[in-house]
Image (cartoon, rainbow, N blue to C red):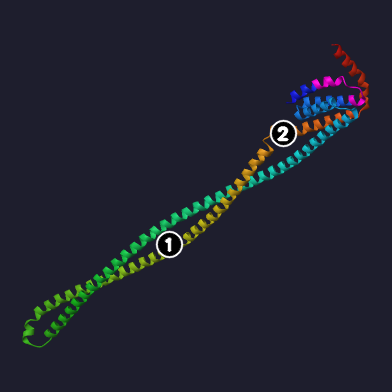
Amino acid sequence: EATSSLSQLSFAQTGLLSRLSTRADLRNFEAVRVVRGLAQKEHSSELSMLATRMASAMHHASSSNGVFDKIKGMISDMIAKLEREGQEEASKKAYCDKELTETKAKKEYKGDKIAALATKIEAANAKSAQLKEDIAGVQTELSALMKSQAEMDKLRALEKVVFEESKAELEKGLNGIKLALQVLKEYYAKDGAAHDNAEGGASGVIGLIEVCESDFSKNLAEIISEEEIAVSTYEETAKENSITKVAKDGDVKYKTKEAKGLDETASELKADHDGLSEELDAVLEYYSQLNAECIAKPSSYEETQRRRFAEIEGLKQALEVLESPALLQRRSAIRRSLRVRRTV
């Protein structure tokens, strides 16, 4: 587009050379030339179109003074437009720099917070799982302990029944033996010839019964001793089991409470994590929009500013040309160039 406009301008300028008659014409022509050269140098379609409009204004002008003001206005308007665009781009650049910096900081901050929360959640869940595993193990031990205690209670009750029955039978037998000994001794203690004749046999019977009495007494003492030992062993074991049960129940209660607290903490952290994740998603979306708006451009801000500065300075030079009387000295040279072209 710029090349086409400049080609049209070249033809237009060839026609303009033949119409230069005043100082204003010379200044206008030189201003067009400056703008045209600037358009070519900066590859600017806007400046190319401006040069074309300036040349067209000169071509169709009815008076030199009128076209001078018109061309000067065109250049001034373009300078104002470029300066306004430069200010807008500078404001946009400041906005982009500020927003990109702040958004990047937010992205990193929230990302770090989310990572830290994820680590805490993982630690809380891992510890809670370990506690629950420990609780299950302790509960298994408690179940085995209660089963063992129940079997021991059942065995103790059976042993007690057997003891009481055995003791009753031995005591009954022992009392019978004692009664028999008493009767025999009283009988043989009476006076009489028959007793005297049977004294030798009576001593043997009494001795045998006394041996039975001794055996019964011994057996009774043994089962009583065995029962006392069994009771003592049972009570000691039952006490140990009771202490163990209290300790394990306390362990289960404490670990259950701790695991519950960890689960609640993990749930709260998860809520914070999810909330921050949503915030981070919004930040990332905004950051992506900023990148598309502020970074993904075919030319950098610095290059755009450099080109705009060059265009503004070039247009100011064109304005100076319009107001410079020194161009009058070039008038004769331009006319000579015109005569040479006509001859050719």
Residue closest to the eye, 280 or 207: 280
Q: Among all residues in the image, which is located at the extreme bottom?
A: 191
Instruction: Judge the density around disc 2: few (<14), some (14-19), many (≥20) Cα neighbours within 10 Å.
Output: few
Q: Quadrant of the N terminus?
A: top right
Q: Quadrant of residue 295?
A: top right
Q: Quadrant of the C terminus?
A: top right
Q: Is 65 situated above or below 292?
A: above
For disc 2, the marked residue is 300
247 lies left or right of 184: right
Marks 1 and 2 sit apart, C-alpha to C-alpha, by 72 Å
Magenta-colored span: 11-25
Q: Indicate the secondary structure of the residue bearing disc 2.
A: loop
Residue 161 position in % (x across, y down): 25, 71
Q: Indicate the secondary structure of the residue bearing disc 1.
A: helix
* Residue 218 visible at all: no
- Residue at 81% of width from left, 27% of height from top? 51
* Residue 27 visible at all: yes
Residue 318 position in % (x across, y down): 86, 29
Q: Is 144 situated above or below 66?
A: below
Which SS does the magenta portion mostly show? Answer: helix
Mark seen at residue 248: 1
Q: Quadrant of residue 175?
A: bottom left
> Amino acid type of disc 1?
Lys
Residue closest to the eye, 110 or 49: 49
Residue 268 position in % (x across, y down): 55, 55
Residue 340 position in % (x across, y down): 87, 13
